[in-house]
Every structure is written in C-alpha cells, then in structure tokens.
Image (spheres, grey):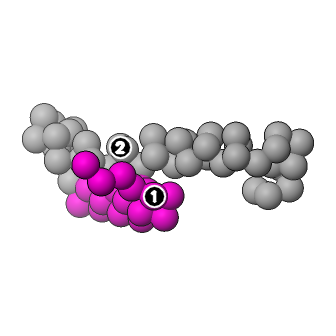
Amino acid sequence: MRKLNREQMKILAAVSMVADHICKIFFPENNAANIIRCTFGRFAFVIFLLLFVEGFFRIRKENYGKHI
C-alpha cells in the first residue's frame, strides 16, 4: 500500500474542504442521504489538524510560532 506524502495530504484536504462547502451550499437540507453525501468533506479538518501537529513536532517548539 502506497503512503501519502505531506503535499498529497494537503491537496486531499483542500479537495475535501471544497466538496464539503459545495455540499452545504447546494444541499442545505439535513436528511440521511445528504449526511452520507457530505461525509467526505468532514475529513478535511482531521487531515489539516494532523499536518499541524506533525509540523509542531518537526520544528522545535520555541520556534514554531515564528514559522506559522
């Protein structure tokens, strides 16, 4: 199984976020079919949070604020 690198994860998260926003704009009703359809977009936050935490541990803690 092939692993994703950081850039591929960023692209996946961005596509997921755009899909979530499109889903919320064009399908505002809150039914079971819509929830299943829009689930893919909810992974964006998890991926961005993972990348943020990984970056925090890759850079020394006292300098991380300067890099953001």
Q: Which label number is shown at residue 45?
A: none
Helix, strand or loop status at disc 1: loop
- Quarter of the image for residue 62 reads top right
Q: Residue 7: image x %, image y %?
A: 48, 64
Judge from the rendering whether residue 30 lies leftward or rightward of residue 49; answer left or right. left
Kindly identify the amino acid type of the residue bearing the numbered disc 1.
Asn
- Under mark 2, the amino acid is Arg
Decide whether residue 13 is among the magenta residues: yes
Query: Sequence order check: which comes first, mark 1 or mark 2?
Result: 1
Residue 21 seen in render:
no
Q: For this rendering, which residue is in front, 61 or 43?
A: 61
Q: Which mark is on residue 42?
A: 2
Q: Which residue lies furthest to the front in this view?
A: 1
Say which quadrant the C terminus sits in.
bottom right
Residue 45 shown in magenta = no
Name the residue beneath numbered marker 1. Answer: 5
44 lies left or right of 61: left
Q: How far apart are marks 1 and 2 (CA)?
A: 20 Å
